[in-house]
Image (spheres, rainbow, N blue to C red):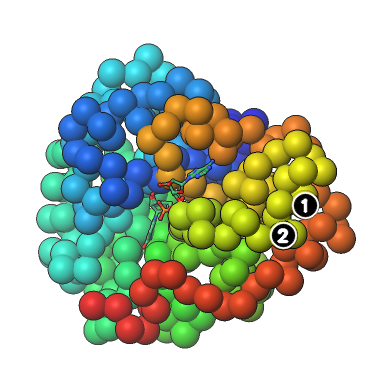
Amino acid sequence: NLQSTTTLNNAVKMPRVGLGVYKMEEGSDVKEAVLSAIDIGYRSIDTASFYKNEEGVGQALKETSVPREELFVTTKVWNDEQGYEETLAAFERSMEKLGLEYLDLYLIHWPVPGKYKETWKALEKLYKDGKVKAIGVSNFLEHHLEDLLEDAVIKPVVDQVELHPRLAEPALRDFCTQRDIKVEAWSPLARGRYFDDEVLQNLAEKYDKTPAQIILRWDVQHGIITIPKSTKPHRQKENADIFDFELTSEEMKQIDELNTGERNGAHPDEFD
Ligand code: NAD
């Protein structure tokens, strides 16, 4: 179920399925979406300073009767906040907005060239000071990770990347598995672009599920942490209802074969 966790390389447990809140409006929109998700059973929320909705997320976390220690909150340091001192200050701003005493997971949002190593040092400091339970990265390719690992004292626990059946990233996933770094999928549903795919449609019919549920189940069976976004309670419920069936290894392979390497978001070597 939604409380099912995976163990990160520093022994912290992270829910396998969480709620992404990108593009949710600051204030009551995001607050209501987070409260409804928590009500459904979600325990992990993925935000970022860039999303400009940390305050609404924080309000929901304050209002819910679910205790803080049962929740798992991720936020991220944005590109123009990177650098050692800048990141320490950005973290304080995020924590102020979220209204939290500690954070569960802090990520470097994108590998800003020439900056991400200094940013990482700040994350290590925050981790050592006990302000954050785990630190990781986002949108890092193998070469960024290799570079970071050269002088990192603490290893990232996750790499959150664009990942869905059309961009399955098998090489990056192998690379991360070998180094005990979990892969987390952003835009796991590719925002619905491929729901009409025949393979997904056939499997959906076979299991009496939706293409979204087939994709999210594929994530979970691959050990990929996934954070589908929806503001609608019925879809939040649908995206969580993936723990009562299992794809066969043949079916997993059929979905694996949909990989074309097609990216919808920015390339981690060419963003700005
Ligand atoms: P997603 O793949 O989760 O798709 C979300 C959209 O798909 C929704 O807006 C809705 O239109 C549709 N949808 C959701 N559930 C559905 C269902 N059951 N049936 C039909 N349609 C459904 O896309 P996303 O929001 O881009 O990604 C998820 C989360 O990943 C974000 O909210 C954010 O937290 C994170 N993210 C991170 C980065 C990064 O750079 N680290 C970038 C993008 C997103």
> Is 234 left, or right, of 67 in this rendering?
right
Give the residue number, with chain letter if any, for mark 1. Answer: 202
Q: Residue at x 41, y 19 (%)?
A: 66
> Is 39 left, or right, of 123 in this rendering?
right
Q: Picture quarter containing residue 120? A: bottom left
Say whether marks 2 and 1 touch (CB < 8 Å).
yes
Q: Residue at x 72, y 60 (%)?
A: 198
Q: Badge 2: how crowded within 10 Å, few (<14), some, or many (20+)?
A: few
Q: Badge 1: how crowded within 10 Å, few (<14), some, or many (20+)?
A: some
Query: Could you tell me how far apart the alpha carbons at marks 2 and 1 are, in whole angstroms?
Result: 6 Å
Q: Residue at x 25, y 74 (%)?
A: 118
Q: Is residue 169 above or below residue 129?
A: below
Mark 1: amino acid: Asn
Residue 179 x, y percent position in the rendering:
60, 70
Q: Is residue 75 visible?
A: no
Give the residue number, with chain letter if any, for mark 2. Answer: 198
Residue 240 x, y percent position in the rendering:
58, 34
Q: Observer-nearest residue: 163 or 222?
A: 163
* Count of numbered circles on the image: 2
Q: Picture quarter containing residue 28? A: top left
